[in-house]
Image: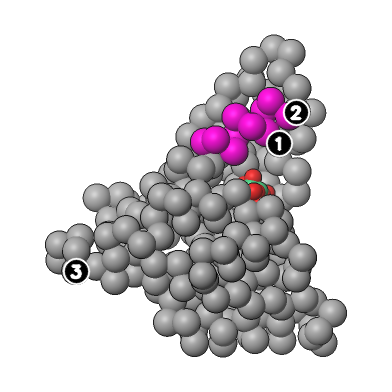
């Protein structure tokens, strides 16, 4: 298939400011058949939703308080994602754990970006964890989402050095700059069918 024949639909889930969403919109959306067809959030006030509206993209919100439990929230969210015809679900600063049923429904079709070199510093505040630990190198990981917290197969990683005396804001800026490079890159590779899980090892991702 040539790139002009490609039709690849993405839904992005975001809880916060949405700078990664913006990088995806700027670098991928509308290019070579890749289209962001929806942006969902657990937080109706998330600035990411503003960015989506400005780009003319459908939005939907799924605040936990509107649902009895996480499973019913994720079922509603999954039904909405299916209604958009999405090929891929992209978590971009989506700060909720998704339920096992959700992972199963979109198996190997959910990506996440994490601000550390996994398996180091999973979970919340990875940048603070790295600073607290005193490591000299941290970075960014793009991975498939599985049932664990930041445990899925790694697609792409890039290192970021932590120079002596760097403050948190500087490190955050350096990490975000790398995120905005490698997330569109990784999503583009998935869209072009270049990424698959190795048949002999479900942890290992092969990029062709
Ligand atoms: C990003 O740094 C992303 O790596 C992180 O949230 C930030 C969202 O920023 N995600 C996690 O920590 C997930 N465990 P953004 O809203 O500006 O894209």
Q: Quadrant of residue 15?
A: bottom right
Q: Which mark is residue 127?
A: 1
- Callout 3 touching callout 2 (CB < 8 Å): no
- Which is nearer the N-term, disc 1 or disc 2? 1
Residue at far left of view: 2
For residue 42, side relative to residue 23 (left or right): right
Colour treatment of the image: one colour
Q: Cβ–Cβ below 8 Å for labels 1 and 2?
A: yes
Relative to 132, say whether 119 is above or below.
below
Labels 1 and 3: the sequence-earlier one: 3
Q: Is mark 1 within 8 Å of ligand 1?
A: yes
- Cβ(mark 3) to ligand 1 < 8 Å? no
Label 2 sits on residue: 168
Q: Which residue is mark 3?
A: 5
Residue 32 seen by the camera: yes
Q: Secondary structure at mark 3?
A: helix
Between 151 and 52, the residue placed more toward the observer is: 52
Q: Which residues are magenta?
A: 169-178
């Amino acid at each position: 298939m040539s790139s002009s024949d490609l039709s690849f639909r993405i839904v992005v889930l975001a809880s916060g400011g949405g700078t990664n969403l913006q990088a995806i919109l700027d670098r991928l959306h509308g290019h070579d058949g890749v289209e962001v067809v929806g942006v969902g959030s657990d937080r109706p006030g998330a600035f990411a939703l503003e960015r989506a509206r400005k780009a003319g993209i459908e939005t939907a919100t799924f605040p936990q308080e509107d649902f009895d439990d996480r499973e019913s929230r994720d079922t509603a969210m999954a039904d909405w994602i299916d209604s958009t015809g999405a090929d891929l679900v992209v978590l971009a600063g989506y700060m909720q754990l998704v339920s096992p049923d959700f992972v199963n429904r979109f198996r190997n079709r959910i990506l996440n970006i994490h601000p550390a070199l996994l398996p180091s510093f999973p979970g919340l505040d990875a940048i603070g964890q790295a600073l607290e630990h005193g490591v000299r190198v941290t970075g960014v990981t793009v991975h498939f989402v599985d049932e664990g917290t930041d445990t899925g197969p790694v697609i792409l990683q890039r290192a970021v050095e932590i120079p002596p005396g760097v403050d948190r804001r500087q490190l955050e800026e350096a990490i975000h700059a790398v995120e905005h490079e490698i997330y569109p890159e990784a999503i583009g590779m998935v869209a072009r069918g270049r990424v698959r899980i190795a048949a002999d090892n479900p942890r290992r991702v092969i990029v062709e």
